[in-house]
Structure formats: structure tokens, C-alpha cells
Amino acid sequence: MARAGKAPLLAPPAGEVASLADQAYHAIRALIVTLELPPGSHISEPVLVERLGIGRTPVREALRRLAQEKLVEVFPRRGMVVTTVDVRDLARLCEVRAVLEPEAARLAAERATTADLVEIAGLMAEIENQRGRNDRLLIDLDQRIHRAIYRASHNVFLAETLEGYYAHALRIWMMALDRTSELPAAVQEHHQLLEAIARGAGARAAEIMSAHVEHFEEAMRDVLLADES
């Protein structure tokens, strides 16, 4: 897994990108999540082709995939735009995450391998030493924690599904960073979650993850409501 500050957010682990379409997908998704392509902005295929140095066909395939994931929207005669985010989107996102994320945590507690536990121990140590980290590094740590839990569930279908939903959650975090002070506390919440997983306490891990998703929704709702007022 890429370390903080050395790879873009939501970049795939080394060796997992098998095609140009995959490369284009991860690159464009990162531009959307980090708000370099902000909500509501027009998407130009020629501009992306030139910016990424990847051919038109892989870029088009990537954009179709992102449209399926609701990060890009296609309008007749208007072309493609980055989807917007409102309170209803947040509520629907959290409805799904509130079901799937606790299950991933429960499975991780039951199925974590020795290698998974070593990674989890390292993440717990990073959480304990998060002082002085800026928001970008905290977001990177949050991302790596969630990915570690998804992988430790050893259910590839669940992990891939949650990766897609996490991209939406991460974009909302990026939109809120300059208007909320909740990020350090949200990252700190993961310590007891990872501790429960390391102990094999599946029910407890699921309970903590459920509360974590609920706290995220509460914090982000205030920001999105302010945007709509």
C-alpha cells in the first residue's frame, strides 16, 4: 500500500492495474475525489486524453465505468459532468455503508490473517502518532485503514463494492475539510475499531464501525446543509 504523500488518493495498490482503461479509471476518479474536477464541472475527453497521456478509447471506457458508479453523469447534447453532492446523496450513501461497512469489520475480525494483523498493528501505531499530520495525510491514513479492513474481510465482492462507496465518502470529506474540525477525531475512532478486529471481536468491531458511519453522516450533513442554504 502506498504511503502517505507518495501516491494520489484512491490509487490502486502496486501491481493491481492491468490495463490502460484501469489506469485511466483510477486517474480520473482521483481527479474527481480530490476535487481537481469539482462537482458540476464539465468533462472533456480530449483534455483528459492529453492530461493523462492515455488513448481516447481507454478514457472513454473509464468514464463509462465512473458513470455507473455515479461519479459522472451523462446529459444528452451537454456531454458529461461530474456529479454533484447534496444531503440526499449523503443519506443514501450512509444507508448502504451502514449495512456493508459493519459486516466488513465483522468478517475482518473473524478472517484476518497474520499478514493482515501486522498491517493493522502498523495502522494502529500511526493513529497513536497522528499529531502534526495535516488533513491530506489524515485522509490518506483514513483511506488505508478502510482498505485494510476491506481486504481483511477476504470477500472480494464486498471489498470491491465498498471501495466504490468509499470513493463517494472520501469526496465528501474533501469538500468539507475547510469547514469541519471532525477529521482528527474520525481517524482516532479507528483505533478501537482496529483493536477489536485484532482481538477477533467481530460483534464489537461491527458495532464500532456502525457508530463511525453514523458520526460521518452527522458531521457531513451540517456542511452540505450549509452549502444548500
Image (spheres, rainbow, N blue to C red):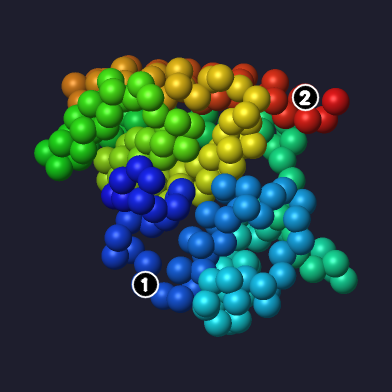
Residue 103 visible to the viewer: no
How far apart are labels 1 and 2 at the CA level? 41 Å
Instruction: Determine the residue positioned at 41% across, 36% down.
Output: 137
Residue depicted at x 28% and y 23%: 129
Pointer 1 local density, CA inside 10 Å: few below 14, some 14–19, many at least 20: few
Where residue 187 sits: x, y (%)?
41, 25
Residue 150: give x, y in percent of width and height.
Answer: 35, 41
Indicate left or right for 4 with 224 as reference.
left
Query: Which residue sits furthest left?
Result: 114
Q: Position of residue 141 (x, y in %)?
A: 37, 35
Could you tell me if residue 28 is visible in this image?
A: yes
**Which residue is tagged 1?**
18
- Quick one: 63 or 100, which is closer to the camera? 63
At label 2, which amino acid type do we have? Ala
Q: Is residue 80 left or right of residue 70?
A: right
Amino acid type, residue under disc 1 in the picture: Ala
Q: Tally the numbered discs.
A: 2
Residue at point 74% right, 36% down? 86
Left or right for 16, reference 171: left
Q: Which residue is mark 2?
A: 226
The picture places residue 38, in percent across and down from the top left corner, at 69, 50
SS at badge 1: loop
Residue at the front extreme? Answer: 132
- Please tell me in which quadrant of the rendered image residue 44 appears: bottom right
Q: Is residue 215 above or below residue 153?
A: above
* Element class at badge 2: helix
Which disc is residue 215 wearing?
none
Disc nearest the viewer among 1 and 2 = 2
Q: Can you say whether 193 is above or below 108 in the image? A: above
Q: Quadrant of residue 144?
A: top left
Among numbered discs 1 and 2, the one appearing first in the sequence: 1
